[in-house]
Amino acid sequence: MAIKDWTKQEILDVYNTPLMELMYKASEVHKQHHTVGEVQVSSLLSIKTGGCPEDCAYCPQAARYHTEVKVHKLMSVTEVNDAADNAKAGGASRMCLGAAWREVRDNRDFDTVLDMVKTINSKGMEVCATLGMVTEEQARKLADAGLYAYNHNIDTSEENYNTIISTRNYDDRLNTINNVRKAGLTVCSGGIIGMGEKIEDRVGMLYTLSILRPQPESVPINALVAVEGTPMENQPPVPIWDMIRMIATTRIILPKTAVRLSAGRLNMSMEGQALCFMAGANSIFAGEKLLTTPNPLYNQDMEMFSILGLTTKKAFTDTLKEELV
């Protein structure tokens, strides 16, 4: 079945649908394309923390902001191996490695990351990395090492982007996604709500993701975690209804994509998260931290899965790579 070409107005109309009707529609779309109650669990590990030269207004890892994040050099392969074992034991089928870099450089650190990817891949886990901008050649090296997915969020709409970040532009984001695609990797790309953006910016972000060919296999929807010391420290929390509405709209616009309920879950009740799953979310990050911000513990998530009747998705069972073309 051909992928629908959405206009911004059509996406806005979906977003503004009365909430109960929107959830119902999203749930129906979800049932058509996914196994109901099956959730892909990922673990996100910060392998190199802080000291980033970028000025992303939401990020406590930017060197120019005075936050409580401590700068840590690149972890060792052994440390990452142990973290992967713990994540797998906790039910994760994907391990995501995040480094606070502007871009990947061809040096000893990158060689170490390639070794990390090989180590985790050997455990039968999917490996994802978010390392900043990459060239096509670097992306191919990651793919050859066994990387399954590359995360590079577009964050917000193209029109709103320069109010959030000035140290790179929107095309830089899209070029990296293009390089990742050329290397044969799956794409994980989404954004953040609660940064003071307009509804039209949320729609614009989804529009950009919807016109990518292939569409991203995974789209994280993050609620801003306002961190003291960043320019966004005084942003109010995202209402759960906004998060549900955004999840539902994403599910309808990107029917075959995994929609990940990402940052901000610690502030959500189990009931709120349940509504997000009903609205089409079928992926989460598990573990006590998302890079540097708090996240529910594995045992809390597994208790929630038990209560809601959710099951964890096995690694490498995703056929979207072929379907989304």
Image: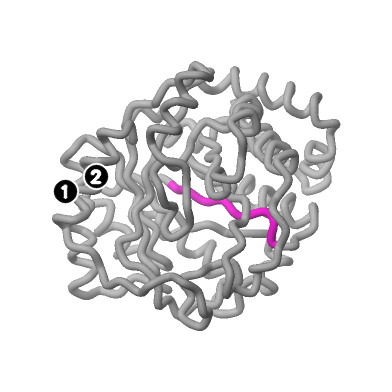
Residue 181 visible here: no
**Which residue appears at 70% of the width and 67% of the height?**
234
Q: Residues within 10 Å of mark 1 (few under 14, many from 20)?
A: many
User: Left of 105 or right of it: where is 240?
Assistant: right
Give the residue type that dot 1 points to: Thr
User: Left of 74 or right of it: where is 136?
Assistant: right
**Which residue appears at 65% of the width and 69% of the height?**
232
Q: Against 210, is 37 above or below?
A: above
Quarter residue 230 falls in: bottom right
Quarter residue 135 falls in: bottom left
Q: Position of residue 311 (x, y in %)?
A: 43, 21
Mark 2 to mark 1 CA distance (whole Å) = 9 Å
Q: Nearer the viewer, residue 306 or 171?
A: 306
Instruction: Say which element carries label 2.
Output: helix
Instruction: Say which element carries label 1.
Output: helix
Q: Residues within 10 Å of mark 2 (few under 14, many from 20)?
A: many
Q: Against 82, is 51 above or below?
A: below
Q: Which residue appears farthest toward the bottom when viewing the image? A: 64
Mark 2 and mark 1 in contact? Answer it, CB < 8 Å: yes
Residue tagged 1: 119
**Which residue appears at 65% of the width and 38% of the height?**
247
Q: Earlier in the sequence, mark 2 or mark 1?
A: 2
Q: Position of residue 16 (x, y in %)?
A: 84, 39
User: Left of 222 or right of it: where is 61?
Assistant: left
Give the residue type that dot 2 points to: Ala
Residue tagged 2: 84
Q: What is the magenta range?
A: 187-195
Q: Against 246, is 68 above or below?
A: below
Quarter residue 253 falls in: top right
